Amino acid sequence: MVQVRDRTKESFQRLATAELAGLYSLARRLLRDGAEDLVQETLLHAYRSFGTLRQDAAAGPWLRSILVNVFRDQLRRQARSVEELPVEQVEDFSLYQTLVEQDPLPYSDTLHHDYLRAFGKEDVREVLLRLPEIYRAPLVLRYMSGFATKEIARMLDAPLGTVLARLHRGRKRFEREMWVYAQENGLLLRGTVG
Amino acid sequence: MTVNQAPISCSEAVRQLWDYLDQAISLEDQGKVAQHLSFCRKCCGELEFAKELREFLVSRAADELPPDVKARFERFVADL
């Protein structure tokens, strides 16, 4: 038997409240400032289109998808154009290989693992925010929110090939920024490693 | 899948590693990467690190909602 979904305001409140932390986390990784406004705008849009949610169990992805749409529309309104990086500018960097060559933790038996462990959530957010939005958004949506690349292409209204290329460049750029960020902020000297 | 395929270079294999893990490349290309990984220890290291980096990103994806922000959101939802 198909269960008829309850579309009352109370039902929306219950579903939305359970997703607030996830929405806020996503918004903070997409934006440096204005995450709270983005979530509120999302909730407003979601409430207006509550009828389009087919299953309560899909509320999380549905709300995150609306958040990304609102985020994309905000970017368009700001009319900021970000130049795509030539592939060769980022293509060659390998964090794995850089760590092997530079060996920033000479006493570590698990260098790569310990290096990553030095980065807390706020450090990773800072590294992400150093990336242009066109690279950051696909990266966050794919590897932090778990959306499929086709779904990301739909949400960002971009061809799949473009999303795949931006994911590739975004990953490389992210690795390079991790390396630079750790050096600039003395991350390996904080005593959190080892 | 790996029979009669031209080998690919380390840089080509590394370039495709994440897409290989995502299964976002063709079966033929997956075969080429798998073939390369079968004999290249360095690229196996890159692969293991790529896997760890993916898990690392998931582990850094969620924050606790600060109480004041939570209260504002809940008020906002209640006032809709």
Image (cartoon, coloured by chain):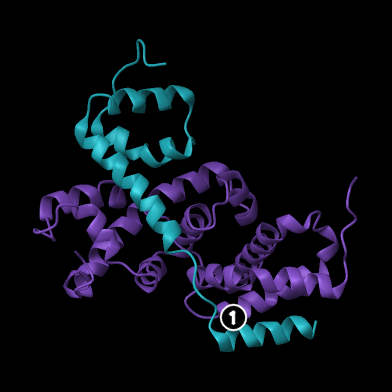
Chain colours: A purple, B cyan
Considering every residue shown, the one lying at the far front of the view is A1
Q: Quadrant of the C terminus of chain A?
A: bottom left
| In the rendered image, the vertical position of residue A166 relative to residue A38, given as above or below | above
Q: Residues within 10 Å of mark 1 (few under 14, many from 20)?
A: some
Instruction: Name the side, left or right, on which A57 lies relative to A84.
Output: right
Count how many numbered circles sit on residues in the image. Answer: 1
Compared across the picture, whether B48 is left or right of A76 comes to left
Q: How far across and down, in percent of the image, does residue B21 sit?
A: 42, 38
Q: Quadrant of the N terminus of chain A?
A: top right
Q: Is residue A161 above or below residue A137?
A: above
Identified at 23% across, 24% down, the residue is B39
Residue extending farthest to the left is A106
* Residue A21 image offset from top left, x and y in percent: 58, 72
Residue under pointer 1 = A36
> Does any portion of residue A42 appear in the rendered image?
no
Residue at 52% from the left image edge and 48% from the top image edge:
A163
Dot 1 amino acid type: Glu
Q: Is residue A74 above or below residue A96?
A: below
Provide residue A179's location: percent of width, then percent of height. Answer: 24, 62
Give the structural element (helix, strand or loop) at label 1: helix
Chain ID of residue with mark 1: A
Image quarter of residue A46: bottom right
Q: Visible in this render: residue A109? A: yes
Q: Nearer the viewer, residue A74 or A141?
A: A141
Which is nearer the eye, A9 or A148? A9
Residue at left 16%, top 73%? A189
Q: Residue at x 26, y 54 (%)?
A: A113
Q: Locate residue A177, reporting x and y percent.
A: 30, 63
Left or right of B35 on screen, residue A10 = right
